[in-house]
Image (cartoon, rainbow, N blue to C red):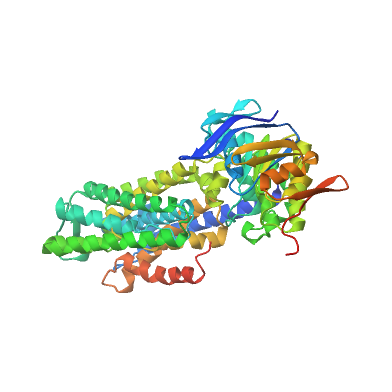
Amino acid sequence: MILEINNVSFSYGSIGVLRDVRFSVSPGEVLAILGPNGAGKTTLLKCINAMLRPETGSVLVEGHEVLRLAPSDIARKVGYVAQQSEPARLTVFDAVLMGRRPHIRWKVSERDLMVVDAALKRLGLDSLALRYIDQLSGGEFQKVNIARALVQEPSLLLLDEPTSSLDLKNQIEILSLIRRVVCSHRIAAVMTAHDINSALRHAHKILFLKDGMVFAVCGSRDVTAETVEAVYGVRVEIHHVGSIPLVVPLDGQGE
Amino acid sequence: MHFDDGQIPEEYTRYIGRKIAVILAGVAVLLVLLVVSVSLGSMSIPLLDVVRTLAGRSVSERLDIIILNIRLPQALTAVAAGAGLAVSGAVMQSVLRNPLGSPFTLGLSHAAAFGAALAVMILGAGTMTSSNAGAVHISSPYTTTGIAFFFCLANAGVIIAVSRLRRSTAEVMVLTGVALGALFTAGTMFLQYFADDMQLAAMVFWTFGDTARASWSELGAIAGVTLLLSLFFQYNSWNYNAIDAGDETARGLGVRVDRVRLLGMLATSLLTAVIVAFLGIIGFVGLVCPHMVRRVIGGDMRFLVPASLVTGAVLLLASDTVARLLLAPHVLPVSVLTAFLGAPVFVALIVRGGRR
């Protein structure tokens, strides 16, 4: 197991957000957290790398209790791609090199440069290396953010709605990229998602969060219409296109 | 993870080399300018004599006195203060994630001026020793600095508190700074109204930022603080880069964002307070320099910090030299000139939408 979460609860003041959340993720797996707005998806993600501190429970990454590690130690194990990142006036190379920050003190080492170089090549960004990131398209910029998280050399990748502002082509490209990297490096990824169909298509496992509790965790091929209906309160049918499940809402058509 | 198939990217190494070359060129310009600045004045000194005297080979006793006791301290003060103000601006713009951050626009200078006026008034820390503009004497400069620092800190605290409120935008934070600046200006005016002639003169002359005020010991304090804090800023440059990418991204990289921001504001406040307390208000250097530098070498704080130091030093030394010569034999305080220089640039930044 790369990630094991047990009994995690979290609240903002008196408002409970997460209750007794437990699940685990194995190497080579992408898990998508789905649920209605306000179900606690982003909160859960931030509890995993201790950006928010759960009140109870434990978060184990490769057997280490994350809540007891220093921030830069966590950053060497867990990469985080925020929902919003600001394009500063940095080159692509420097923006990705920043991901080595948990490993750098005063001086950038040759290995740091080599790791960044390799990551840029793997994501097809090497031709843009010296371009400023405020001149990139949305898809390219998101790849930079993912590359930055990858050069942290984490065993776990957290992504907060990685495709929320991207067009269809970039969505597919980014999500299959994540899946490919996770499989080839035997790391794990946890991402929050809004688009249930793209999550079913690209994630191995789905975690449904409802009212701060885990409603169901299952393989993406095993999601049932009943589960989706119970979580979102919308009547749906599940069709299979090839082996890919497709959720089709039944309400709200043709009015 | 296995990323061992990478190579040292030559193109990137060359790009970094170019940045270092730009900074070294700036240092060279600064050194030349320093010699030129020392040679110019009410009495022109041949460049060669300046170099000889600076190298420790005395040309004449009179030149020794002019160069080593008058012109060199003033020139080096301009260098240290310009460097300190510019690097403060660069760091503030980064930790506040706000392109309009600077000691001047965020009201820190005004807060320090109020603190200094308070010290002059209440503690009798300063008196005017003659009617010449340069002759204000702050009798206990460290008390004045301390009180100026305290008010800088209070000002910074309010700005941090506002910036941590949700949805606070660049505009909100700058406006907070402007409001605080106005508040402290009002406070200073209040003190001035009740001050006697001597105190009033001391307060007013004090606010004209002027590098002629510093002697070797004050120069030492300014240079020392600038140097130490610049090392601190340089050490934190990756943290500042990370914060530039957004607070959450920075946290994901293991940066203790709140602590870095707080310490950054504290350090820039201290630096500003020391400079302002000894020299008075010198505006716009801190705001304009980082933007000029960013245009040329980009926003990477690893290079923005040293490049801002050099550019600020060059800019203030050049302004100071021009200010000494412009209306000769009258000597203009450098702050008047930097305001004339900086204001149009400030307006240009607003027109361009304040985007970095």
Front one among B223 and A132: A132
Q: Is residue B118 visible?
A: yes
Residue A90 lies, in percent from the top left, at 60, 54
In this image, A110 relative to B39: left or right? right
Looking at the image, which residue sits at the far bottom?
B327
Task: Farthest residue to the top: give it.
Answer: A63
Quarter holding residue B8: top right
In the rendered image, residue A27, in percent from the top left (x then y), is placed at 74, 32
Seen as rendered, the residue at the extreme right is A242
| Tag count | 0
Query: Left or right: where does residue B279 sit relative to residue A120?
Result: left
Q: Is residue A134 left or right of residue A13?
A: right
Q: Position of residue A231 (x, y in %)?
A: 67, 44
Instruction: Tell me which corner region of the image, top left, top right, bottom left or bottom right, holds residue A157.
Output: top right
| A172 versus A203 height, above or below | below
Pick the quarter of the image with the C terminus of chain A.
bottom right
- Which quadrant: the N terminus of chain A? top right
Residue B70: x and y, percent?
28, 58
Residue at x-position 21% and y-position 65%: B133
Residue A192 seen in the current view: no
Which is more toward the observer, A192 or A77?
A192
- Seen in the picture, residue A22 relative to B302 is either above or below; the reply is above
